[in-house]
Image: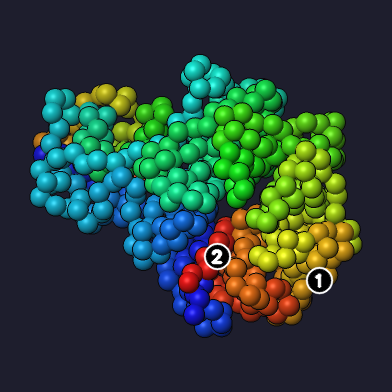
Amino acid sequence: MIRVALPYHLQTLAGIRSEVTLTVAGPVTRDSVLDALEARYPVLRGTIRDHATRRRRPMVRFFACKEDLTHEPPDAPLPDAVASGAEPLLIVGAIAGG
Amino acid sequence: MSAIRVLVGTRKGAFVLTADGQRRDWSVAGPHFAGWEVYHLKGSPAEPDRIYASQSGGWFGQVIQRSNDGGLTWEQPGSAPAARDASPDAAAGAPMPGGESNRFLYDTSEETGRPLTTHQWYDGTQHPWEFARVWHLEPSLTDPGVVYAGVEDAALFRSNDGGESWHELAGLRGHDTGAEWVPGAGGMCLHTILLDPGDPERMFVAISAAGSFRTDDGGRTWTTINRGLHSGFLPDPTAEIGHCVHRLALHPSNPDRLFMQKHWDVMRSDDAGANWYEVSGDLPSDFGFPIHVHAHEPETVYVVPIKSDSEHYPPEGKLRVYRSRTGGNEWEALTEGLPQKDCYVNVLRDAMAVDSLDPCGVYFGTTGGQVYVSPDGGDHWTAIVRDLPSVLSVEVQTLP
């Protein structure tokens, strides 16, 4: 099972209060995890990836295992610890403001 | 006894204010969608307990919300209610329907419009059309399942299924001038949608900073309606497009008569926008954002003068609504109950509305978080609430 931690506003939107656990068929990549997440919670479509371009929204970031994976290719394998469920994939709203 | 429901969109959520027909004692519910920008909420005239809301934010984009119980509970149209997402089916990974209600894709097909993919950018180059948010939702006057959305970058969308899915009325952007439209400081937004109560094929829209447009065929083709406007910031002040129209208003009894608050100038048209003339008259400033018409007096118009395009607050620090009973030109200041010193708030374009009781109630919200009501057409004002987040929009429903 893949563990995904969502930021507060997306938890609220999806009506959840904890990590999400997902089953991902095939390679565990950022896109495959997001595909599974959006299939479970369709309301999240467009909130993490742009509807039209499918690219990451500019102020959304992806962390795991104390690393910033935001700029990794979306089809690159996620760390083994994420694929095994030992560590969550963190979806984070970028810090903004002063 | 009648009741009033005021729908308030703010920078940090939505609020629903309710009172009976006396409009003295108010209840405040909210924030709904806390922490998100709610540019606009509006109820269906055909089914008032159905309310549409535009929830958006810089991080996570656009969400459309819908209530079928007058704002008590909300759902994303077409998606399973949030509570069901925790059901065993969901836990097992079964896909749920929905997710289309926040999908606003520009139509670039050859069949329905033109493959228009760019518009003019601030530096004069062409820039891709990029969806940012829904500024305004306008439910059909007769069908609770039909709703229009005015969006940034400027385009008009329509939903025929209560907001579950959207399609662009591409003829508007496909207008001959589309590639020349430019954004204003606040972005290039379609912010005003007026439906003609006497002609379901006719509607009016306004775009900053392109101008005003009218369709007479349900949105397939559009005509610019900017003749008579004069904008000093344009190389050609009377150009066909490029005008920063802030808001349009009409009275249902005479939809050929339009009122406009432009970047500067208060304007009027008596021929459905074909020609405009200025009616700023004796206003202390003719810069402003909202404009609205009295519910029962088609010649009575309200504006909120703002000092200038460089200083977005009331002249002299006095918050004054101005009323004309003559369709413009002659204006009177309405000040009773409004702060008359040290007031430096703004009133945004969608933040004024009227109810349809007699006497007519007038409402507006400020960037300082106050929502004011006048239950007597503007003669006396009181604050319903004083400390909401910055108000983006105010709509009013008069309920039986």
Residue placed furthest toward the right: B282
Nearest the eye: A28 or A15: A15
Q: Give the residue number, with chain letter if any, for mark 1.
A: B333
Nearest the eye: B91 or A55: B91
Q: Callout 1: helix, strand or loop? A: strand
Apparent side of residue B399 relative to residue B72 in the rendered image (left or right): right
- Disc 2 residue type? Val
| Labelled pair 2, 1 in contact (Cβ < 8 Å) | no
* B158 shown above or below B343: above
Give me the chain letter of mark 2: B
- Comparing marks 2 and 1, which lies closer to the viewer? 2
Can I make out residue B37 in this image? no
Residue placed furthest toward the top: B110
Can I make out residue B44 in this image? yes
Pointer 1 local density, CA inside 10 Å: few below 14, some 14–19, many at least 20? some
Nearest the eye: B36 or B88: B88
Residue B53 image point, x, y percent: 45, 53
Residue B21 image point, x, y percent: 54, 79
Residue visible at 27% across and 23% down?
A75
Nearest the eye: B150 or A32: B150
* B233 shown above or below B192: above
Q: Give the residue number, with chain letter if any, for mark 2.
A: B396
Pointer 2 local density, CA inside 10 Å: few below 14, some 14–19, many at least 20? many
Residue visible at 51% across and 72% down?
B4
Residue visible at 38% across and 58% down?
B67
Q: Callout 2: helix, strand or loop? A: strand
What separation in Å lies between label 2 and label 1 (alpha carbons)? 23 Å
Residue A81 image point, x, y percent: 15, 36
Apparent side of residue B65 relative to residue B198 in the rendered image (left or right): left
Apparent side of residue A67 relative to residue B296 in the rendered image (left or right): left
- Quadrant including the N terminus of chain A: top left
Give me the chain letter of mark 1: B
